[in-house]
Image: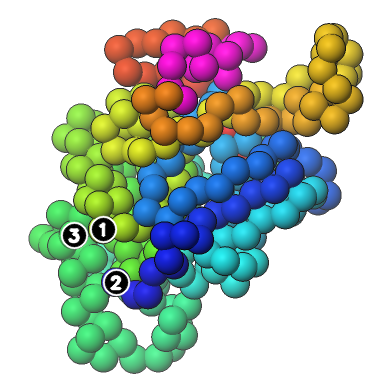
Amino acid sequence: MGERVTPARPAVSLRGAAFGYAGRTRVAGLTLDIEAGSAVALIGPNGSGKSTLLRGLLGLADLTAGSVEVLGGDPARARRRTGSLPQSDSRDVDLPLSLRQVVAMGLYRELGPFAPFGRSGRARVRSAIERVGLAERSGTRFGELSGGQQQRGILARALVADPELLLLDEPFNGLDRENRDALLELVRELSGEGRTIVVSTHDLEIAQRACTHVLLLASGHAEDGAEGAGGRNAEHAEVERFGHPTSFGPVDRALTLEAVEHAFQDTTVELDEHTVTTASCAPGEAE
Ligand SMILES: Nc1ncnc2c1ncn2[C@@H]1O[C@H](COP(=O)(O)OP(=O)(O)OP(=O)(O)O)[C@@H](O)[C@H]1O
């Protein structure tokens, strides 16, 4: 792996940060440090801004308030040292490319799209594919892989660049038990290597088994959200108009039933063993 940030320096630092699109805030009130080497589960109802926050950490959503530092600087500049796995429904899976070629795309930022990879590049691609357990499918057309295999393939594409920070957007969605367990084990391993991971999920078991910290987000209230804020100050009520954090900390302290219910308060929540099922979202559904 490449050079790491020193443990004293957070991998992500947010101060009153808000993110959105076209200048319109979608998630706000983020003041927290994610320590290098920690694995953070990002949990919240649909629309609470999990993807927007992850995109903000990649410099792909607008910072509409406050400040953000990723790996000590601007998120866009940190992108070279950051690996990401976007939500599966936002991917173009019908690429006329083999798994090996898709994974090799992870080296473009470092080497350029037309540069020859050389022996070491090819070895890195091979080892990333092996790492996600798909060695036998290297030559298979990407679109012919199962949903779970595609998920692992995209993760290999992120891993080939040896990222310090991994941002994974609901990587467990739609996976069968076997793929889910393999991915969970891999996240644990990657975290054990000292990489910083932020992973959005509806699966509390993922948080408990693979993560060190939890960040719970709640949905924003309607445009008139400032009303009914009781004794809270105007700034707080303003933040609560948007998706906002309700709890952040080590898993054993931040992931309580009360905290989950608080974050999901506007949604029908079922805690089915380990999974938060909401009225508008059924995790585990096939894509
Ligand atoms: N590209 C975009 N342009 C404008 N608004 C967007 C865009 N992407 C998301 N939004 C809006 O931002 C808000 C937060 O969405 P986001 O996808 O971040 O939530 P989420 O917590 O990840 O939800 P889910 O669990 O459904 O993925 C929503 O109101 C959504 O409609």
Q: Distance between the residues labelled 2 and 1?
A: 9 Å
Colour logic: rainbow
Q: How crowded is mark 1: few (under 14 residues within 10 Å), some or many (20 or more)?
A: few
The residue that appears at 32% across and 18% down in the rendered structure is: 274
Q: Which residue is disc 1 drawn over? A: 193
Q: What residue type is labelled 2?
A: Met
Q: What residue type is labelled 1?
A: Glu
Position of 199 with respect to 13 (left or right) is left
**Marked residue nearer the N-terminal end (2 or 1):** 2
Q: Which residues are drawn in magenta?
A: 254-267
With respect to residue 179, does 57 lie above or below?
Answer: below
The spot of residue 169 in percent (x, y) is 46, 44
Taking the magenta stretch, the answer to whether it contains residue 25 is no
Examine the rendering and report whether any part of residue 110 can be seen: yes
Examine the rendering and report whether any part of residue 286 can be seen: no
Task: Give the secondary structure at mark 3.
Answer: helix
The front one of 198 and 259 is 259
* Marks 2 and 1 in Cβ contact (< 8 Å): yes
Q: Residues within 10 Å of mark 3 (few under 14, many from 20)?
A: some
Nearer the observer: mark 3 or 2; the answer is: 2
The spot of residue 41 in percent (x, y) is 43, 36
Q: How far apart are marks 3 and 2 (CA)?
A: 14 Å
Q: How crowded is mark 2: few (under 14 residues within 10 Å), some or many (20 or more)?
A: few
Task: Give the secondary structure at mark 2.
Answer: loop
Q: Which residue is disc 3 drawn over? A: 131
Nearer the observer: mark 3 or 1; the answer is: 1
Q: Which residue is disc 2 drawn over? A: 1
Taking the magenta stretch, the answer to whether it contains residue 255 is yes
